[in-house]
């Protein structure tokens, strides 16, 4: 889910006198919890469906915030009041939130991902999936990829890899008619690039290279694929292959900062490598120390 929540404002301790700012504000707010523990005031209306329980959300630590998010639509901006039971409880969250405090949040819901449709489709057999049009497969694959991107941004690279592979499996398993082949290939290319990058983050350059090369089969001049392959080869100390990929990437984007920096890194690594090689050769073929004889008893 994409969204933003402003830092909570403390409006009232639960044992504070009457006619507090909380009470005055709460009079015009909607009761979401049934006990007036979670109150809502819509500042800007959203559109589309409500957030579903299966939606991908940020790690939520407040019960009240979860109830609040489930009442929202894309693009909505709302103000919420959470009583202590639905917020930070009797202990509060020192030093910002005193014990037993009612808090105010403003939350803007930019977007969210719903996994229910995707999960149901992936649970079908290959024969059942084939009954659906290609557009349905592309939609589910795109959702899986978006979930992967969400997990990737959280540095959950292993979980992201799982989602990307689910997307790729769907796309590989389904053949497309000639007039729609370009749509399937475009979708595959995006997932392959994601997988290559993810395996670099997982420090598995061999797999990163494999998926990068598959991406290049679809688009041999794809700069990202060339760059990822070059990075993978550099990590594998295959310096000539790394140079070949990176030079091809540079040819497509001569002023790309990342590509040029990677070429500088390659040059530095290669100089160090050649220096070590020369030193090793020198040690192997240098004359022995004075007085030493091979085979001496």
Image (cartoon, grey):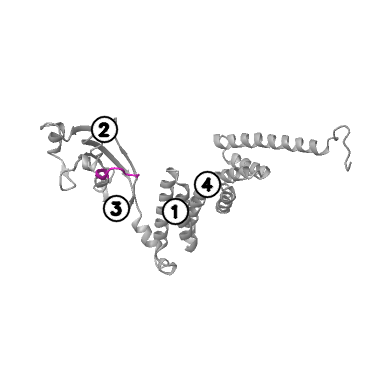
Q: CA distance from mark 2 to mark 3?
A: 28 Å
Q: Quadrant of the N terminus?
A: top left
Q: Which label was assigned to residue 97?
A: 2
For the question of whether residue 177 can be seen, the reply is no
Give the SS element for disc 3.
loop
Give the SS element for disc 2.
loop
In the displayed structure, would residue 284 be above or below residue 126? above
Q: Residue at x 39, y 56 (%)?
A: 139
Query: Which is closer to the viewer, label 1 or label 2?
Result: 2
Residue 262 location (% of width, % of height): 59, 37
Residue 214 location (% of width, % of height): 57, 53
Residue 118 location (% of width, % of height): 37, 58
Q: Residue at x 26, y 33 (%)?
A: 97
Residue highlighted by disc 4 = 202
Which stretch did the figure color magenta? 58-65
For the question of whether residue 184 can be seen, the reply is yes
2 or 3: tag closer to the N-terminus: 3
Q: Which label was assigned to residue 229?
A: none
In the displayed image of the protein, which residue is found farthest to the left? 18
Give the SS element for disc 4.
loop
In the displayed image of the protein, which residue is found farthest to the front? 297
Specify whether 213 is left or right of 18. Answer: right
1 or 2: tag closer to the N-terminus: 2
Residue highlighted by disc 1 = 163
Q: CA distance from mark 3 to mark 1?
A: 19 Å
């Amino acid at each position: 889910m994409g969204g933003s929540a402003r830092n909570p404002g403390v409006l009232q301790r639960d044992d504070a006198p009457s006619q507090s700012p909380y009470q005055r504000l709460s009079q015009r707010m909607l009761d979401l919890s049934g006990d007036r523990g979670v109150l809502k005031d819509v500042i800007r209306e959203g559109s589309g469906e409500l957030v579903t329980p299966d939606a991908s959300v940020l790690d939520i630590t407040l019960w009240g915030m979860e109830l609040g998010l489930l009442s929202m639509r894309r693009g909505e901006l709302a103000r919420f009041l959470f009583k202590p039971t639905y917020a930070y409880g009797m202990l509060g969250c020192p030093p910002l939130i005193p014990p037993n405090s009612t808090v105010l949040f403003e939350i803007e819901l930019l977007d969210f991902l719903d996994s229910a449709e995707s999960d149901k489709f992936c649970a079908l057999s290959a024969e059942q999936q084939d009954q659906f049009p290609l557009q349905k497969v592309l939609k589910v694959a795109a959702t899986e990829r978006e979930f992967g991107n969400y997990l990737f941004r959280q540095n959950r690279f292993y979980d992201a890899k799982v989602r990307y592979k689910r997307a790729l499996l769907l796309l590989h398993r389904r053949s497309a008619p000639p007039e729609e082949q370009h749509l399937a290939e475009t979708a595959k290319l995006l997932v392959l690039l994601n997988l290559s990058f993810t395996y670099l983050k997982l420090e598995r350059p061999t797999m990163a290279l494999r998926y990068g090369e598959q991406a290049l089969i679809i688009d041999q001049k794809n700069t990202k694929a060339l760059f990822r392959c070059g990075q993978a080869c550099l990590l594998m100390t295959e310096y000539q292959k790394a140079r070949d990929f990176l030079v091809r990437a540079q040819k497509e984007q001569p002023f790309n900062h990342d590509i040029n920096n990677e070429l500088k890194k390659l040059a530095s690594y290669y100089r160090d490598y050649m220096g070590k090689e020369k030193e090793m050769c020198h040690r192997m073929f240098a004359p022995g120390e004075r007085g030493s004889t091979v085979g001496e008893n």
